[in-house]
Amino acid sequence: MTKQQRKILVVDDDPSQRRLLGGFVESLGFSVEEAASAEDALEAINRDVPEMVLLDVRLPGISGIDAVPEIRKIAGDLPVLLITAYADLHEAVSAMKGGADDYLTKPVDLDELGAAVADAIGPADKPTETIDKATPELPEGFICESAAMQHVVETAAVVAPSDVPVLILGESGTGKEVVAGLIHRWSPRADGPMVTANCAGLPESLIESELFGHTKGAFTGAETDRQGLFRAADGGTLFLDEIGELPIHLQPKLLRALESGRITPVGSDMPVDVNTRLIAATNRDLGQAVSDGQFRDDLYYRINVIELIVPPLCDRRADILPLAKRFAAEFAGTPVRLSPQAMHCLLAYTWSGNVRELRNAVQRACLLCRGDVIMPEHLPKKIAAPASQPDSADAVDASRLSQVERATILATLEECGGNRTQTAKKLGISRRALIYKLRAIEAE
């Protein structure tokens, strides 16, 4: 058996979770066998011992913890990684005493899972001709230059084929809805609708009707039947932004809808079947909200099967200039470019408002720009402030270049078509200093 055929057994009673974990395992270069119960897993191990077992703790019949000693009777040294939705210390201790090699909690961190697999059985042999690691095609205009954003995209590609709920975390304005749209686009539900709603923007008195629909006459003003967001997204994806703002008295009904695949419209006693995938997002700490009694723990674990964190713009500076250029092309009626000084301002700014703030700043600059070049004076004053500070680039040790300075130099060099003399002139430093800094960048 070659390394690329090494098999990992994934055991979970949730088909969507099996597909998710199986897809990730295959992306690592292993083959996958699935089992829906511990009993099925034991039969599979008896037939053909895999390289490793990913075993859910809460299973119908024999639990994952009780299955570990049985696995040890069949294959004493078979690596077993237990996965559970509840971070319970006693379960973890029991699992390790029972012979489990490791223990992860849901939401499963895919990087952590990959590291656990590599620690247990080593990396798979993944010849480039047989294993394609490329993500699906990105939509036009989607910016993904930074390593942080590339990681988000790679994770989205792994979770997209599954139906498991996804919780997207991130500050306001980072683009959580854009990432949700990417997951929908790459999923088998792509031909179905993607329906979006902001829980914070829905009137509390009407949010149940908005989500689950209502019948005519269910309450004052209900003059016609309303299908609601879940039925509108049937066969597709429902994206609920600011899920942390959902009133706590409605959270049990959302939980039942996710677990049963059925909703009951307001004013009706007849449940309706729905086939809707949920992607939720929030900028709140839901774990803290659970501790504070503001969010149900059972709903939290149900929607947080996979947690995807969209980083703030200050942590993905390689995306700033490409995003700015894209927005400039969108807002300007004629071709517009960014001056090196303006690029420096954009890169030096903290962007507490993230991508939304950048978009607004570029839109303003395009309106104020009378020529074809955006200058610092076209930007909001708080963003243009770095341009008024003295340039001490010649005095700074190039071996300690900041991310901002490095990005500014490379962006200006690109703007000047690789001409170093012109680049140095635009940056306001000597050509010798520029060459010294470029050598430092190349040595990084």
Image: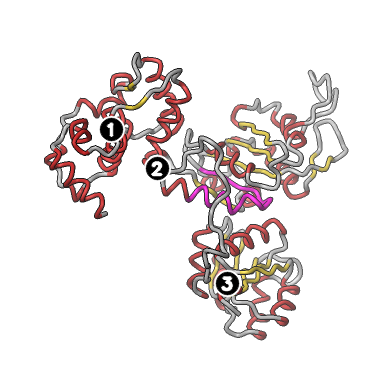
Q: Is residue 413 magenta?
A: no
Query: Compared with residue 208, is residue 89 higher up or lower down, i.e. above or below?
Result: below
Query: Compared with residue 428, is residue 379 higher up or lower down, i.e. above or below?
Result: above
Q: Which residues are magenta?
A: 151-169
Q: How many marks?
A: 3
Q: Amino acid at mark 2?
A: Arg
Quarter of the figure with residue 379? top left
Q: Which of 294/379 is in front?
A: 379
Q: Position of residue 284 (x, y in %)?
A: 51, 40
Q: Which of 376/43 is in front?
A: 376
- How would you rate the neighbour count of disc 2 (Cα within 10 Å): few for under 14, some for 14-19, many for 20 or more? some
| Residue receiving disc 1 | 344
Q: Residue furthest right?
A: 270
Which mark is drawn over residue 316? Answer: 2
Name the side, left or right, on which 421 lies relative to 275: left
Name the side, left or right, on which 121 lies relative to 353: right
* Badge 2 element: loop
Quarter of the figure with residue 289? top right
Gap between marks 1 and 3 measured at Cα: 47 Å
